[in-house]
Image (tube, rainbow, N blue to C red):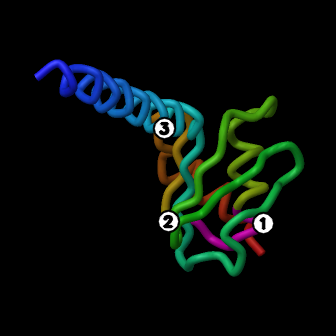
Amino acid sequence: MLRLVPVAAVVATSLSLLGATAGYAQSRSYYVATALEAPAKANFVTRSTAWSCDGAVCTAARAPERDVFVCERVASSVGPLAAFAAGGTALDADALAKCNAKAK
């Protein structure tokens, strides 16, 4: 029984670290851009923003630029977007249309 206590402690610590890592990764994704088609590259950089894509959904940490400019830059890199959100707030249809005007 005494040998199981250290093992249980290691398992509990490992599980808590995995949860913390997942939370950290999610908190780093300030921007979420959903392209109409998956981009050719899974990772790319637009000006000061590093993007990582899983299929057509691309995410990035917050950049020192206005959200609208970030949207325009990602659209110019990956093509038209179906959706774009910054800090959990999605662009409305008009703002998304203006963003997509910069698409390649």
Which mark is first along the chain, 1 or 2?
1
| Helix, strand or loop status at disc 2 | strand
Label 2 amino acid? Answer: Ala
Distance between mark 3 and mark 2 Cα atoms = 21 Å
Q: Secondary structure at mark 1?
A: helix
Q: Residue at x 82, y 56 (%)?
A: 45
* Towards the viewer: 67 or 14: 14
Q: Within 10 Å of the Cα at label 3, are there few (<14), some (14-19), or many (20+) other Cα atoms?
A: few
Residue position for label 1: 76
Q: Is residue 92 left or right of residue 74?
A: left
Image coordinates of residue 90 in percent, x first then y, are 47, 43
Q: Which residue is mark 2?
A: 82
Q: Which residue is mark 3?
A: 26
Q: Check the image and name the residue furthest to the right.
A: 47
Other-residue count near label 2 (Cα within 10 Å), few / some / many at <14 / 14–19 / ≥20:
some
Q: Amino acid at mark 3?
A: Gln
Question: Which of the image's four quarters has the N terminus?
Answer: top left
Counting every numbered tag in the picture gives 3
Q: Position of residue 92 (x, y in %)?
A: 48, 46
Q: Is residue 45 above or below residue 23?
A: below
CA distance for labels 2 and 1: 13 Å
Q: Is residue 76 magenta?
A: yes
**Which residue, as the protein is rendered here, is positioned at the far left?**
1
Q: Which residues are magenta?
A: 75-81
Residue 42: percent from left, percent from top: 66, 69
Q: Is residue 48 left or right of residue 83?
A: right
